[in-house]
Amino acid sequence: MDFLFSILIFTSALIFSLFKNISILVPLVLGMISFSSVAVYRGHKLVSVIKMIICGMKKSLSLMPIFVLIGIITAVWRASGTIPFLVYYGTKLMNPDYFILFAFLLSCIVSFALGTSFGTIGTIGVVLIVLAKSGDVNTNAAAGAIISGSFFGDRCSPTSSSANMIAAITETNLHDNIKRMFVTGAIPFAATLIIYVILSKNNSAKILNTALLSSVENNFNLSYITVFPALLIFILTFFKKNVIFSMFFSAIVATFTCLFVQNMDLIIVIKSAVFGFTLNNSSPLSNIISGGGLISMLGVSLIVLIASSYSGIFEGTGMLNDIKNLLKGMSNRIGIYPTTLFTSLVTGAFCCNQTLPVLLTQQLMSTIYYEKNLSNIDMAIDLENTAILTSEFFPWSVAIAIPLATLDVNSSSILFAVYLYLVPLINIVRLPSLESAVKSM
């Protein structure tokens, strides 16, 4: 009963913080205190509980350098013209007759480059939704396609914080995970393309607003050199270079691009890398392109660290043992992947964010995977195909509430984010050919 009471406190605090626009750090800290109090109430010494918290946090410490580099890259790629290049030429190449389809594909490209759903929504997503509104396109359908594309990269980009987090907590290789994510995501991706082609038939853009594109052209040198920092990440990933090395080298190249292509001062570049890039003019592009920076990742880092402390408390006290036993019985009846999917849905509904459901699902299911002789990489891929995407099903989750607010659309748009549904659902069917392809990689 004490554990259920602490869950109620934590969930209530999460929901309250969402509606009152309070940082999710507040309910996370409150939850950590609440669960720690239960541990002390059950007889664990306070010093032991603190050690459990530290032990849990240590699991995510390896992510901190990656988070720092992600923050820097998202700023210098903006300043160097990399993101403006992708936005400008991607939109220029768009076929108005297939607006929904192209909105998805462009969002996929940008999100795979940036590795962040929020960053994708805030850049190409905002441009696309403006074009959709001015072109008399169904905004919910357009927003759904943009959201689908933004979480494509959030799931499988080498620069994605969530992909790196799953690799860290499951102790797997990021590059191997990415290859297997492409295999397990191939059929859902193809099905998504078909659905968006059908939706595009009745949603062609009548007029494309070119004001934003003109603003991009006027504010940046859009030389083809500016796309090289992004290409570099993919080239180094292809050759299986360490993700930290790849990001660092890309950031250096982007910095030189800022200096010698965009003619920025070194002090301004450094300031942008730390505090975020700012386009200092009255252009409507300013709010879209500005952002990123090391400081922008501090909140994410703290969220992951505090959420990781929960795993230390739960593991050290055995609070989740009863739930694990229930899930073990369920996995024996319906299979381990459907059980993982169910667990991710429940934790996603209650936790109101993306990070904690991932960590809780991993902790609840890890023993079951081990007992069924499944590897860590099996668990990593199942987490990518469930918890990373299912948190966005719930309108009260921060993971989807912020994209909806940024695009200025309602929760009906979630219904059109079909990629989020198709990946978890299609992977319930374990095709023998698919299993063979995955295991042979």
Image: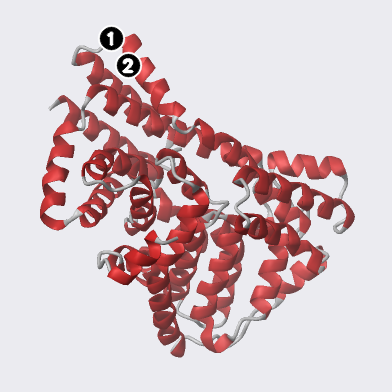
How many callouts does the rendering have?
2
Q: Check disc 1 and report its element: helix, strand or loop.
A: loop
Q: Helix or strand or loop: what does disc 2 sit on?
A: helix
In the picture, the disc for residue 49 is 2
Question: What residue sits 41% from the left and 39% below the top?
Answer: 169
Q: Amino acid at mark 2?
A: Val
Task: Find out whether the residues at labels 1 and 2 contact each other: C-beta distance under 8 Å.
Answer: yes
Q: Can you name the residue that lies furthest to the front here?
A: 440
Residue 45 circle label: 1
Q: Position of residue 374 (x, y in %)?
A: 28, 48
Q: Which quarter of the rendered picture does the C terminus lie within?
A: bottom left
Q: Is residue 311 above or below residue 359?
A: above
Q: Residue at x 35, y 20 (%)?
A: 52
Residue at left offset 51%, top offset 31% = 61
Q: Is residue 1 left or right of residue 73?
A: left
**Mark 1, other Cα within 10 Å: few <14 / some 14–19 / many ≥20:** few
Q: Position of residue 375 (x, y in %)?
A: 33, 47
Residue 402, position as x, y percentages in the image:
46, 53
Query: Gap in Å between the C-alphas at discs 1 and 2?
Result: 6 Å
Q: Which mark, residue 84? A: none
Disc 1 residue type (three-letter): Lys
Q: Position of residue 353 (x, y in %)?
A: 38, 46
220 horizontally vs 388: left or right: right
Image position of 301 with respect to 430: above or below: above
The residue at 31%/25% (across/down) is 313
